[in-house]
Amino acid sequence: MTEALRLPAEKIHAAELEALKADDKERRPPGWALSPRAAVTYLMGGKAANGMPISAKYVGDKRLIETAVATLATDRALLLLGVPGTAKSWVSEHLAAAVSGDSTMVIQCTAGTDENQVRYGWNYAQLLAHGPSRQALVPTPLFRAMEAGKLCRLEELTRMGSDVQDTLITVLSEKMMPIPELNESVYAVRGFNVIATANNRDKGVNELSSALKRRFNVVVLPLPDDMEQEIAIVTKRVGEMAQSLDLPAPKNVSEEVARVVAIFRELRGGATMDGKITLKTPSGTLSTAEAIAVMIGGLSQAAFFNGGKLSAEGLAPNMIGAIVKDPVQDKVVLEEYLETVLKKRPDYADYYHMLSDLT
Ligand SMILES: Nc1ncnc2c1ncn2[C@@H]1O[C@H](COP(=O)(O)OP(=O)(O)O)[C@@H](O)[C@H]1O
Ligand SMILES: [Mg+2]
């Protein structure tokens, strides 16, 4: 039997969604699988009416998720904005799973995305044989979401050209898409809406036109502002991911998470935790998502090469990859941090030695 590497959120959490739905007495907006309150519970965690515990998907401010869910029930679309690794795609997938019961209608926007990938394309064999017809039309995820009354996700919206972005204006303002070749239009079924994500850090992104911006309500997902919360997020996600990858989690995982997160936060914030030393910041974001990736890399290394022992030895090479994105500038930043800060901390001696050896 073959097994999928990763299933969509609504499959992984089918039991939770079912339990939330079973006793959902609150009003559902037309076309929604859950009421807004139940959707928020699915994202933030809690309990279903039958007592089933609902795991937290997003760790952070509940009000952000409430605003996001409330927006989706209006005629405005939702734009999740933030630096890379702040769970924008993650939240978007789970929102679609909760609201539509389907998170698979996704368009990954790139500089090469053209109108046909946003609106619809044509099956040329059919087109040549029979002329333009609905059979020859190839619907995009956006098209299918309109027809099915579901949510469509647009990943990294600002990566595609402004002219292509603007093809969304009619869809978002009039909830319809003209198909001039067939002299007809698709009208969005109730329940349809769009969740876009965009990051405000990358180079080479295209500004949203003000006409399009007006159709979106923006929710900014922040980096966790307190250290405890960030450690909690990383520990939780690392536990879940290790399990799905069949990696054993050694006892000291939470200790190492705390040290990795502390180093990341100091470098990211440009100051030591006690505020006494200012530091240069590296060019990467050193986001929560990167701390998670470092830990998973370390766990894999521990499992396969270090006899299951998780230590600075396996983690440091992964940390270097996250910290030193620019081989010249970032190396200087890291060296300075090692010499002025880590060297003086006895409880970080192993990290100091491993990181110094590798830079
Ligand atoms: N506040 C958070 N709550 C839960 N998971 C988070 C949080 N911040 C980051 N993550 C984790 O970070 C990982 C990457 O997030 P992702 O959605 O790909 O980031 P983005 O799309 O913003 O670049 C996910 O595995 C997600 O679980
Ligand atoms: Mg993303």
Image (cartoon, rainbow, N blue to C red):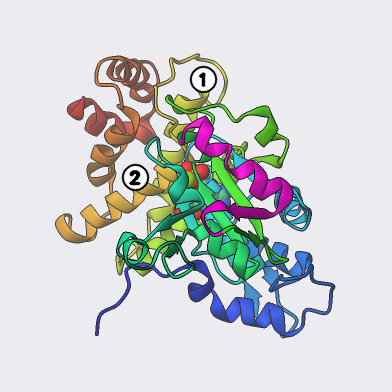
From this view, report whether residue 6 is shown above or below residue 155. Answer: below
Q: Secondary structure at mark 1?
A: loop
CA gap, disc 2 to disc 1? 21 Å
Q: Earlier in the sequence, mark 2 or mark 1?
A: 1
Circles 2 and 1, Cβ within 8 Å, touching? The answer is no
- Residue matched to label 2: 294
Q: Secondary structure at mark 2?
A: helix
Camera-side residue of 173 and 348:
173
From this view, report whether residue 33 is shown above or below residue 306. Answer: below
Disc 2 residue: CB within 8 Å of ligand 1: no
In x, y percent, where is residue 194?
Answer: 63, 53
Camera-side residue of 36 and 196:
196
Which stretch is magenta? 160-182
User: Left of 25 or right of it: where is 308?
Assistant: left
The amino acid type found where label 2 is placed reads: Val
- Residue matched to label 1: 271
In x, y percent, where is residue 12?
Answer: 48, 73
Regarding residue 71, the answer to whether it shows in the image is: yes
Q: Could you tell me what secondary structure mostly forms the magenta stretch? A: helix
Q: Quadrant of residue 217?
A: top right
Camera-side residue of 136 and 78:
136
> Which label sits on residue 88?
none
The amino acid type found where label 1 is placed reads: Ala
